[in-house]
Image (tube, helix red, strand yellow):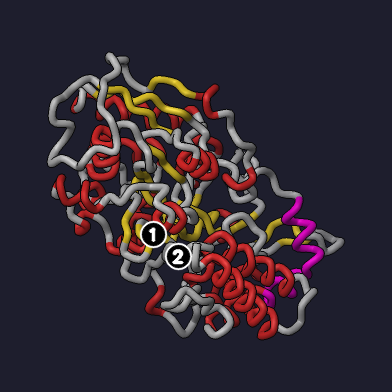
C-alpha cells in the first residue's frame, strides 16, 4: 500500500539480519503464549520484549513507525518492541508454520487475509477485542470486508489506501476533472500530444490495464463490477459491468494504437521514484493512491496538481465520489510467545488516535478509525482531503477477502491484457474462461 515496489516482485529480505530494536531496551520477561486475553493491558506489567515484523523500508516510513512505537512505549514502558523490516507475507506464513513466528506481524496487502484467517496462521482477535471492549463501530464499515474471512477476524486495520484521480493543472488547460468515463475518454483525446511520427509525447490518460495502478482491482470500482458470488465462485463473466469497463478501455487503447501506447508506457520511469510519468508531466491524468501526495511533495514540489474521485460509468452516477479501498493489516501469528503484550501493541497501533494520526501525517496514508479521521491534528490539505472523502463515501468498495484473491486478480488481468492487445477478439469467451479458471482453482482449495 505504501510507495514501494510491488511486494510480489521485491526480493525476499533476510529476516534475521534486519532485526533492530525500535524502542529502548527492557529486561526480557517470562510471559508465555498464547495467553488468555485479559481485559486491558498486560496485567502484571512484567518487563517483556516482543518481536514485530513489518514491511517498511524507506527512511521516512521507518522514522514515522518508530515515532508511533515510541508513543506506545510511553504508555507501556514495561514492553519493548524489537522490529524487523522489509518482511513479506510468505515469510510470515513460513515462520508461523515452522513454529517460530514473531509476536506481531504487519502486512501491506489484503490478499493474504483469507489465508491468514482460514488456516489459523493468525489468531482470532475477537476474544481480544471483546476483553478490551474494542467495538467494530470504531472503523468505517468497508474495512470489515477485508479484515475478516467468513466471520473470523484475524487482523485489524492499520491505515488505509484510497484510490482517486490525479490531474496536472497545467496540462489540463483549464478543464475540470472528468466525472464519467465518456468525459475521461474525450478529455484524454483532447490533451494527448503526438510528435510528427505519431509517437505519444504526452498522454491525457493511459488506459492500459498494465499502467501502474490501473489493475482491475482498482478500476472495477468505476463501473461497480463484482468479483465473486456469495459462494465464492466467480461473478466476472456474468457481470456486464466488466464487459463495459473493458470495452471502454480497449476503445481508448485502439484510439492511441496499442503499439504506440506500449512504446510510450515502456518509456516510463520507476513508479515509486521521481521519474514517475505523472510527476514528470508526461501524463495529464492518472489513477493513484493517496500516498502520491507525499511523493509529489518530496520529489516534485513544483508540480501544480489536483485530485478528484475516479470517473465512473455514465449510467452509474451514484458511484461518483467513491473508489477502491484497501490497507495495511496487522495481527498476532499463531504461536506468538507473548500474545497479550502483542495484543497491547496491535490495539494501540489500530485504535489509538494519536498513533494513527502520527503515521498518517508522516506517510500520507488514510487513518483507519472514525475518531482519527476527525482529529484536528490530522493534516488535511485539499489534495489529501479528497482521499479522506473517498474513504468515507458509501460508494467506496473493496475486494472482500478470498482464499484465492491474488490468483483471481492475476487471471482477470491476464485476460484483460490479451483483450486490449488484440490477441483475443471474443470478450465474452475470455471472461467465461476467467470464470472457469477461478472456479476450478476454488474447487482445489475449498477443502484446504
Is there any visible trace of residue 348 in the rendered image? no
- Circle 2 SS class: loop
Residue at image mark 1: 146
Is there any visible trace of residue 382 in the rendered image? yes
The residue at 44%/58% (across/down) is 114
The residue at 50%/79% (across/down) is 313
The picture places residue 262, in percent across and down from the top left corner, at 76, 60
Q: Earlier in the sequence, mark 1 or mark 2?
A: 1
The picture places residue 214, in percent across and down from the top left corner, at 59, 61
Density class for disc 1 (Cα within 10 Å; few <14, some 14-19, many ≥20) is many
Left or right of 195, for residue 349:
left
Between 189 and 293, the one nearer to me in the picture = 293
The residue at 58%/32% (across/down) is 13
Query: Could you say which quadrant of the image residue 330 lies in?
Result: top left
The picture places residue 159, in percent across and down from the top left corner, at 36, 47
Residue at image mark 2: 399
Between 216 and 349, the one nearer to me in the picture = 349
In contact (CB < 8 Å): disc 1 and disc 2:
yes
Magenta region, main secondary structure? helix
Is 201 one of the magenta-colored residues?
no
Is 263 one of the magenta-colored residues?
yes
The residue at 49%/60% (across/down) is 165
The residue segment tinted magenta is 250-266
Q: Which residue occupies the extreme right position in the image?
A: 197
Amino acid at each position: 500500500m505504501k510507495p514501494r515496489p510491488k511486494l510480489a516482485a521485491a526480493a525476499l529480505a533476510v529476516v534475521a539480519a534486519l532485526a533492530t530494536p525500535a524502542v529502548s531496551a527492557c529486561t526480557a520477561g517470562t510471559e508465555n503464549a498464547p495467553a488468555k486475553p485479559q481485559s486491558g493491558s498486560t496485567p502484571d506489567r512484567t518487563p517483556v520484549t516482543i518481536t514485530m515484523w513489518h514491511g517498511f523500508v524507506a527512511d521516512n516510513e521507518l522514522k514515522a513507525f518508530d515515532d508511533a512505537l515510541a508513543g506506545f512505549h510511553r504508555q507501556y514502558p514495561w514492553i519493548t518492541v524489537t522490529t524487523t523490516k522489509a518482511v513479506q507475507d510468505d515469510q510470515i506464513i513460513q515462520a508461523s508454520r515452522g513454529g517460530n513466528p514473531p509476536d506481531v506481524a504487519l502486512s501491506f496487502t489484503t490478499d493474504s487475509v483469507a489465508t491468514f484467517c482460514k488456516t489459523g496462521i493468525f489468531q482470532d482477535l475477537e476474544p481480544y477485542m471483546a476483553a478490551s471492549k474494542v467495538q467494530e463501530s470504531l472503523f468505517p464499515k468497508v474495512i470489515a470486508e477485508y479484515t475478516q474471512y467468513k466471520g473470523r477476524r484475524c487482523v485489524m486495520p492499520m491505515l488505509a489506501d484510497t484510490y482517486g484521480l490525479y490531474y496536472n493543472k497545467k496540462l489540463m488547460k483549464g478543464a475540470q476533472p472528468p466525472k464519467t468515463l465518456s468525459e475521461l475518454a474525450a478529455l484524454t483525446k483532447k490533451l494527448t500530444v503526438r510528435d510528427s511520427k505519431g509517437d505519444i509525447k504526452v498522454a491525457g490518460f493511459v488506459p492500459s490495464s498494465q499502467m501502474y495502478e490501473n489493475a482491475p482491482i482498482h478500476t472495477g470500482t468505476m463501473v461497480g463490477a463484482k468479483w465473486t458470488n456469495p459462494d465464492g465462485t466467480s461473478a466476472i463473466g456474468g457481470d456486464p459491468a466488466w464487459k463495459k469497463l473493458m470495452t471502454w478501455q480497449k476503445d481508448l487503447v485502439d484510439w492511441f494504437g496499442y503499439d504506440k501506447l506500449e512504446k510510450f508506457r515502456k518509456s516510463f520511469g520507476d513508479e515509486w521514484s521521481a521519474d514517475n510519468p505523472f510527476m514528470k508531466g508526461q501524463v495529464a491524468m492518472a489513477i493513484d493512491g493517496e500516498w502520491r501526495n507525499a511523493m509529489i511533495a518530496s520529489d516534485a514540489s513544483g508540480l501544480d496538481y489536483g485530485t478528484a474521485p475516479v470517473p465512473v460509468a455514465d449510467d452509474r452516477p451514484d458511484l461518483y465520489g467513491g473508489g477502491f479501498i484497501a490497507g495495511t493489516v496487522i495481527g498476532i501469528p499463531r504461536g506468538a510467545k507473548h500474545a497479550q503484550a502483542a495484543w497491547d501493541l496491535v490495539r494501540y497501533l489500530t485504535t489509538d488516535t494519536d498513533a494513527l494520526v502520527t503515521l498518517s501525517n508522516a506517510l500520507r496514508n488514510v487513518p483507519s478509525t472514525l475518531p482519527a479521521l476527525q482529529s484536528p491534528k490530522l493534516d488535511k490539505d485539499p489534495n489529501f482531503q479528497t482521499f479522506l472523502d473517498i474513504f468515507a463515501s458509501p460508494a467506496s468498495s473493496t475486494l472482500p477477502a478470498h482464499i484465492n484473491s491474488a490468483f483471481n486478480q492475476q487471471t482477470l488481468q491476464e485476460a484483460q491484457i490479451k483483450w486490449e492487445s488484440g490477441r483475443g477478439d471474443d470478450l465474452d469467451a475470455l471472461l467465461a474462461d476467467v470464470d472457469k479458471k477461478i472456479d476450478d482453482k476454488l474447487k482445489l482449495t475449498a477443502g484446504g
